[in-house]
Amino acid sequence: MRLWSSLGGLGMCAALLLPAGAAFAEDDPPEDQQVYPVVYTQRPLTLSQMTLELNAGMDVTRLIKLDPKMATRDLETRISIDAGAGFGITRNLEVRASLAALAIRPKVGYGNPSIGATYRFLNSGLEMGGRLTVTLVTSPDTIVAVDKIGGILKPSVPLLFHFGKSARLDFEAGLPITIQKGKPAMVGIDAPLAFSFNFVDAFHLGLRSSLYINDFKLASRNITIPLGAFAGISLGSESPFLEIDPFFMWPQFAQPGAADPKVQKKINIDVYTVGGVVRVFLFM
């Protein structure tokens, strides 16, 4: 009950911040007049009706592993690839799946597929919706404090602010519920934030961060604040169009309450991830 009350409170607080003329998503232009924008900062919270997004990406994570017994710093490289798709059922409802997730290094394995859906119920300057994502943890990852096989159920409230036609702010308030084999269930918070702007129509650049706590019971010790940058180049102006999105991330940039003796400092730039995603948008 506390979980759903928290989500309800997030929605109510966001609604109170709306301008007086706020309108629900049903006030959008007719579906046959909608075109999914090539310009990133002008895109809505959900894909337009009958729009298919195909995506594939690769990321490389570089770790510096500390051995407290020998005071050595060993390098380790992790490589993973992922492919998925999103589909706009209506202008306000989209579904997504990431099913072809594969770890290449340090060992080959099928890693952490996910499915989810987003429903946009508000659109007037501020866009707001409800989202549910289900992730199956088949390749545990200590970087995000999930070290056993299990699953993550994350209900969330995504919000999108447009600043004219050249900038946008994305925010999501989520409550991940983590279930792991042989461990009690954990409820935490995942609140990613991203700001981006378009230099020109075909090129955007942005910064992203997040507040991540995997378990409220040990919140002060489990706070992780990643930091990263991303970019995108859009090619084409009609269906289909292609987008190439490189990114860089420090996934453990700040850990202010870390109690692990192997964590030598609160700001960690030893662990970093670089990668990219290719997206193709098709209008059915």
Image (cartoon, helix red, strand yellow):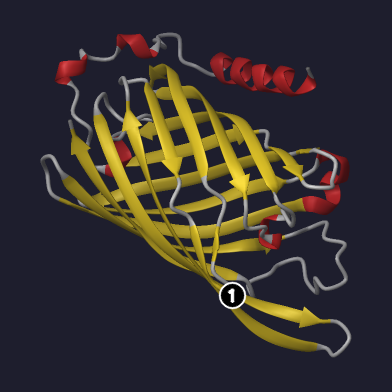
Q: Mark 1 points at which residue?
A: 106
Horizontal relation, residue 74 to residue 242: left or right = right
> Which residue shows up at 74% across the image and 40% down it?
179
Q: In this view, does 274 lie above or below 230?
A: below
Whether residue 15 can be seen here: yes
Residue type for callout 1: Pro
Q: Quadrant of residue 73?
A: bottom right
Q: In which quarter of the image is residue 227?
A: bottom right
User: Residue 266: x and y, percent?
Assistant: 76, 66
User: Residue 43: x and y, percent?
Assistant: 30, 35
Q: In this view, does 76 lie above or below 240?
A: below
Of the pair 133 and 180, the residue shown nearer to us: 180
Q: In which quarter of the image is the N terminus?
A: top right
> Which residue shows up at 62% across the image and 71% down it?
271
User: Residue 20: x and y, percent?
Assistant: 45, 9
Of the pair 159 and 143, the residue shown nearer to us: 143
Instruction: Look at the numbered disc 1 and give the secondary structure of its residue.
Output: loop
Horizontal relation, residue 156 to residue 160: left or right = right
Question: How many marks can you see?
Answer: 1
User: Residue 151: x and y, percent?
Assistant: 67, 42
> Which residue shows up at 74% across the image and 24% down it?
3
Q: In this view, does 250 lie above or below 124?
A: below
> Which residue shows up at 19% across the image and 23% down it?
34
Q: Is residue 215 above or below residue 205?
A: above
Q: In which quarter of the image is the C terminus?
A: top left
Q: Residues within 10 Å of mark 1 (few under 14, many from 20)?
A: few
Whether residue 166 can be seen here: no
